[in-house]
Structures are given as C-alpha cells and as structure tokens.
Image (cartoon, grey):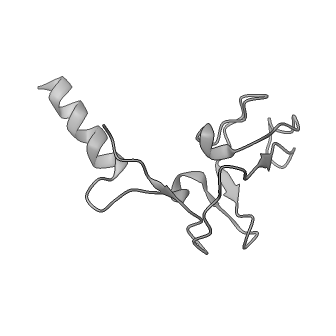
Amino acid sequence: MDPQPRIHCPLCRWEPGADARWVCTPSEPGAGCGTCWNTFWTAGCCPGCGHFWARTQCHACKRSSPHEAWYHYPAGDGAAPRKEKSLEKAAG
C-alpha cells in the first residue's frame, strides 16, 4: 500500500480539514462552474466541469501555490521515485 501524503500549504503549512472547500471560479480559462468541493479529494479536478486547477489558494495565508506542492510524502517515499521504479519493472 502506498504511503499517504500529508497535505498542507507549502507556504504557511496550514492543513485543510475534511470540511475545507474551494469554489470553481472563472479565474482560469475553462473554469467557473461554481462547484464547491474539497480540491484534495479529486487532486485538483473540479467535479462539476472537469477543470484541473494548476494552483490552489490557501485559506489561511490567502496565497496560491502549485497544487502538486501541497502533497508532502514521508522522507524516502516521494511519488516520482515510486513511479520510476514501477516503469523500470514494466520495461525490464
């Protein structure tokens, strides 16, 4: 079983709870359907319109960061190395 990442703002370390919600607004082209959801349940994809959000705004510090930067894996268990290993096994 893959280790689950800790999710927190890469700028201020605020951790969103299960009740945290974001709204799909027209701030990016192709977005703006108004759906309200927890962006980390869908890896940044709006369930209403399918728009993938490249950045996520923190509720605490109000700054936005790349969505991927919010995921923090335990030391030595980063997502990129794990994917590379599985690709090497498939190719070999």
Give the x, y percent position of residue 72. 44, 59
Give the x, y percent position of residue 26. 87, 44
- Which residue lies at the image location 81% right of the left edge and 38% below the top edge? 31
- Which residue lies at the image location 87% right of the left edge and 34% below the top edge? 33
Q: Up-down: is 24 above or below 50?
A: below
Q: Up-down: is 17 above or below 48?
A: below
Q: Up-down: is 33 above or below 21?
A: above
Q: Up-down: is 40 above or below 73?
A: above
Q: Is residue 87 left or right of residue 45?
A: left
Q: Quadrant of the N terminus?
A: top left
Give the x, y percent position of residue 6. 47, 57
Q: Is residue 58 left or right of residue 4?
A: right
Which is more toward the observer, 42 or 52?
42
**Outermost left residue:** 92
Which is more toward the observer, 46 or 7?
7
- Which residue lies at the image location 84% right of the left edge and 49% below the top edge? 27
Total numbered badges shown on the rendered structure = 0
Which is more toward the observer, 30 or 12?
12
Give the x, y percent position of residue 13. 57, 71
